[in-house]
């Protein structure tokens, strides 16, 4: 990839996505489940750029959304409403109402109180809400504690006993139609065993619901399949699909998968520029124009994003030394790489971080009043802008309106 030309054209910091690879990853996923009825609902939270979602919509992707904002994005990007599912532990009344108005595939319910809210809102609208219930299988997915979700100590879903009660309640209600069952163990999973065990456990539970005449049609296995950031082992897609398909043998469910990271993670790069180099008596620092507000994963999870260096001049790799790569933000936790071996660098050289397609831009912020980066896509050998660098004027527009006396509207 010609990062030097791209950085001249679009400036830095810059996210670059290989859309051909995104498409391939999606098609591989679809192929792995082609043996039976399946719906791949791309998890928008990983990367919700409209053009990127549109690329997947053209391949008939569904969408897994976790806010009504994501549902709206999915629709704007061309995902069919009947392929959209809406999950999350804290949906507001307004979000539930809008999801019902939009008539998406189903709402994934995560608590007893939520089920009652959905029922009463549907009743008020004279509708029947299609729902699925997220079951927490209490299985340790062995991933980073911040992104593990399938244990009873996590806030997600309900235990099987509660789920049984809720399904029976929903079956009796004229305003609820329980059509699916859902679980999700966590993200960046690298071990197949917990997924297999959970799938079998939830299948067994689903069978008990079928015996109670609860007419489930969708078996939603969540997302979570990991990628290689450093040298961690990963789950082979084929093995993953087989584990789930085997657990489902003899049952006529449509499988739903909600992959995010697997689809977009490896396709994304964060391109940054070296501003300065500086030494203390303890350390060498490379200061770049990208920061934790652009890619928070290293600061937040201690995540490793491999990097490579590009220069218009020749790099002297015989003189490498250890350095921390840090951003301009006023926090010691603002680093993108620690203790990496780098050659002498000059202002203007590029440092490019890999595997930044998932949870990169989507977790970016304006911290320190920094503008979020531009996003660029590469497809069939051509580059195109997917989102322009944020403008300072847009960032402060509402505050400025208020400062000038416009106090109308509190939405
Ligand atoms: N479905 C549900 C219900 C989820 O909670 C998630 C991710 C996914 C699907 C997609 O998971 P994936 O296939 O991308 O692993 N910010 C963290 C990851 C948080 C994941 C949250 N839920 C990170 O940067 O590693």
Image (tube, rainbow, N blue to C red):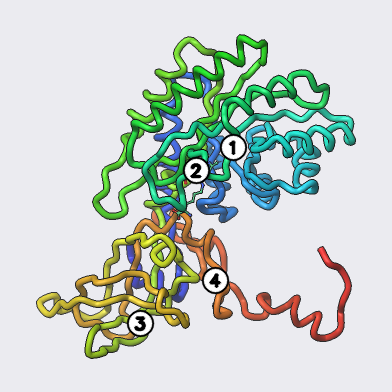
**N-term-proximal mark, 3 vs 2:** 2
* Viewer-side residue, 267 vs 242: 242
Give how far across and how far down residue 109 sits, in percent: 67, 35
Give residue 28's quadrant in the image: top left
CA distance separating discs 3 and 2: 35 Å
Q: Residues within 10 Å of mark 3 (few under 14, many from 20)?
A: many
Q: Is residue 249 left or right of residue 182?
A: left
Q: Residues within 10 Å of mark 2 (few under 14, many from 20)?
A: many
> Mark 3 highlights which residue?
287
* Viewer-side residue, 300 vs 267: 300
Give residue 310's quadrant in the image: bottom left
* Viewer-side residue, 258 vs 280: 280
Q: Is residue 239 left or right of residue 62?
A: left
CA distance separating discs 4 and 1: 33 Å
**N-term-proximal mark, 1 vs 2:** 2
Of the numbered discs in the image, which one, if any, rests on residue 136? none
**N-term-proximal mark, 4 vs 1:** 1
Of the numbered discs in the image, which one, if any, rests on residue 372? 4
**N-term-proximal mark, 4 vs 3:** 3
Of the numbered discs in the image, which one, if any, rests on residue 157? 1
Give how far across and how far down residue 165 sits, in percent: 68, 23
Q: Pointers 4 and 3 in contact (CB under 8 A)?
A: no
CA distance separating discs 3 and 1: 43 Å
**N-term-proximal mark, 2 vs 4:** 2
Q: Residues within 10 Å of mark 1 (few under 14, many from 20)?
A: many
- SS for callout 3: strand
Q: Residues within 10 Å of mark 4 (few under 14, many from 20)?
A: many
Q: Is mark 2 within 8 Å of ligand 1?
A: yes
């Amino acid at each position: 990839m010609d990062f030097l030309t791209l950085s001249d054209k679009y400036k830095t910091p810059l996210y670059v996505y290989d859309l051909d690879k995104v498409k391939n990853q999606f098609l591989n996923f679809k192929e792995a489940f082609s043996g039976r009825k399946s719906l791949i609902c791309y998890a928008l939270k990983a990367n919700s750029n409209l053009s990127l979602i549109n690329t997947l919509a053209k391949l008939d992707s569904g969408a897994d959304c976790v806010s009504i904002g994501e549902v709206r994005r999915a629709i704007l990007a061309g995902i069919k409403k009947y392929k959209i599912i809406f999950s999350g532990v804290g949906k507001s009344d307004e979000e539930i109402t809008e999801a019902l108005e939009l008539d998406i595939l189903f709402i994934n319910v995560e608590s007893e109180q939520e089920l009652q809210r959905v029922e009463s809102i549907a009743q008020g609208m004279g509708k029947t809400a299609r729902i699925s219930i997220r079951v927490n299988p209490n299985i340790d997915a062995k991933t980073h504690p911040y992104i593990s979700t399938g244990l009873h100590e996590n806030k997600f879903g309900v235990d099987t006993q509660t789920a049984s009660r809720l399904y029976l309640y929903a079956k009796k209600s004229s305003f609820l139609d329980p059509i699916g069952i859902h679980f999700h163990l966590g993200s960046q999973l690298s071990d197949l065993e917990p997924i297999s065990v959970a799938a079998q456990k939830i299948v067994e539970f689903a069978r008990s619901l079928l015996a109670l005449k609860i007419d489930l049609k969708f078996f939603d296995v969540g997302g979570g399949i990991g990628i290689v950031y450093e040298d961690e082992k990963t789950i082979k897609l084929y093995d993953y699909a087989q584990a789930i398909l085997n657990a489902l043998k003899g049952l006529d469910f449509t499988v739903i998968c909600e992959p995010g990271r697997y689809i977009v993670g490896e396709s994304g790069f964060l391109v940054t520029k070296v501003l300065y180099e500086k030494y203390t008596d303890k350390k060498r620092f490379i200061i770049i124009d990208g920061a934790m507000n652009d890619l928070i994963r290293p600061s937040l999870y201690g995540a490793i994003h491999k990097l490579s260096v590009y220069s218009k001049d020749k790099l002297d790799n015989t003189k490498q030394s250890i350095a921390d790569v840090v951003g301009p933000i006023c926090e010691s936790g603002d680093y993108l790489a620690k203790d990496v071996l780098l050659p002498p660098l000059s202002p203007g050289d590029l440092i490019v971080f890999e595997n930044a397609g998932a949870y990169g831009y989507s977790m970016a912020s304006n911290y320190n009043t920094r503008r979020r980066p531009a996003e660029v896509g590469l497809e069939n050998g051509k580059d195109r802008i997917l989102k322009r660098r944020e403008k300072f004027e847009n960032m402060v527009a509402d505050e400025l309106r208020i400062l000038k006396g416009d106090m109308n509207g509190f939405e």
